[in-house]
Amino acid sequence: MKVAFVSVVPSPYQRDLFRALAQREEVDLSVYYLEATTPESPWPQKTLETYEQVLRGFWFPLGSGRCYLNWPVPDLRHFDVVVMNSLMSVTAQWLIRTQLRYKPWFFWGERLGQRGGLHARGAAVLHRAAGIAAIGSFADEDYRRRFPEPRHFCIPYFCALDAFLATPRRARNDGHTVFLFCGQMIARKGVDLLLEAFQRLGSSAQLLLVGREAELPQFLAILPVDVRKRIVYAGFQPPEELPRFFSQADVFVLPSRYDGWGVVVNQALGAGLPIICSDMVGAGRDLVKEEVNGLLFPAGDSAALAEKMQRFVVHPALCDSWGVASRQQAQHWTPKTGAEKWVQTFQAVLDA
């Protein structure tokens, strides 16, 4: 079957899936990106595979996002099925409303925001999609309610975890519990909440921060000096360096006020870490099993977050037993598994 994906940028995590799909004998894959890189996702640029192509074009601001206009657009009419990973762009809307008007196409995405105006009109095309592949159950529930007409599938992010699985965790013999956050240091990610919660913990707790600095200086400025001394900021790290930093931690924390998915939770599984995340993190709904490999807390509640973190300080043995449960679960979250889900989804729609 001839399959095309239209995505925004060559993220390393999507590329893990595309690589696995390209290895399937029944799939003839093409991938088109609207842009080579974005300021929000400054991954090092890697050589594209033969089935990948960055389209020529430009972007302009649309609200808080970027809207793309690419030309020439690829001819998608000869593909058996097309997957759109973008809706809010001139390019995506043009392809959907012209070339894909009589072709089976999917939308694959995280949970959409509830904004009106242009976003609502852009999302309206989902009513006539052949299928919606939601990135996780958090998104799937919302798509089924808002767009009942298409067929619905739940296909979360599956990324390569081999390097995380192969990296031993640190030996905990120093009496400290090290918490790790990895991501942009911004309010949406709940970094301010994390620092507020961390301040409530005792001197045996340490915090390792990895990611773009963004708003971190202003968050740190209000903390007492003795608390700042227990925090290490390692800066932004390329994907291949992340296993080394995850291995230095005992517990992973993602306190986002909102996160459609959160691939770092997949990575924490592979690293064998127990996970604390808010109930507004999509990946938490599917990857965190309460009291088995992690804990959830109400988004925005720093006191509740501090209480969850304190459990690992008081009961450090949980870091080991729940970490083992995470690593066992990681065996089922490989790109190969994701590729199989996509092949089954394509066949289900084409055979209908």
Image: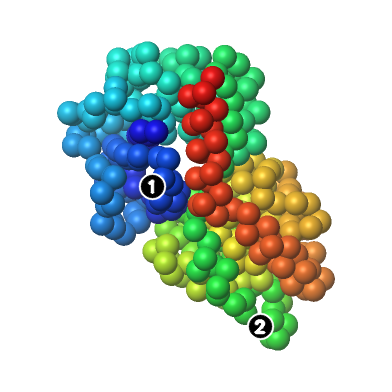
Image location (x, y in percent) of residue 274? 70, 63
Name the residue nearer the viewer: 212 or 126: 126
| Residue 107 seen | yes
Residue behind mark 1: 22
In-image side of 39 versus 121 (left or right): left
Using a 10 Å C-alpha cutoff, classify the residue at mark 2 as few (fewer than 14 neighbours), some (14 to 19) or many (20 or more).
few
Image location (x, y in percent) of residue 178? 64, 72
Q: Which mark is residue 171?
A: 2
In-image side of 167 versus 303 (left or right): left
When the figure is inspected, residue 54 is found, relative to residue 149, above or below; the finding is below
How many marks the image carries: the answer is 2
The residue at 73%/63% (across/down) is: 325
Q: Amino acid at mark 1?
A: Ala
Image location (x, y in percent) of residue 338? 53, 46
When the figure is inspected, residue 242 is found, relative to residue 174, above or below; the finding is above
Quadrant for the C terminus, please. Answer: top right
Specify how the rendered protein is coloured: rainbow
The residue at 24%/42% (across/down) is: 54
- In this view, the mark in front (2 or 1): 1
Q: Earlier in the sequence, mark 2 or mark 1?
A: 1
When the figure is inspected, residue 181 is found, relative to residue 261, above or below; the finding is below
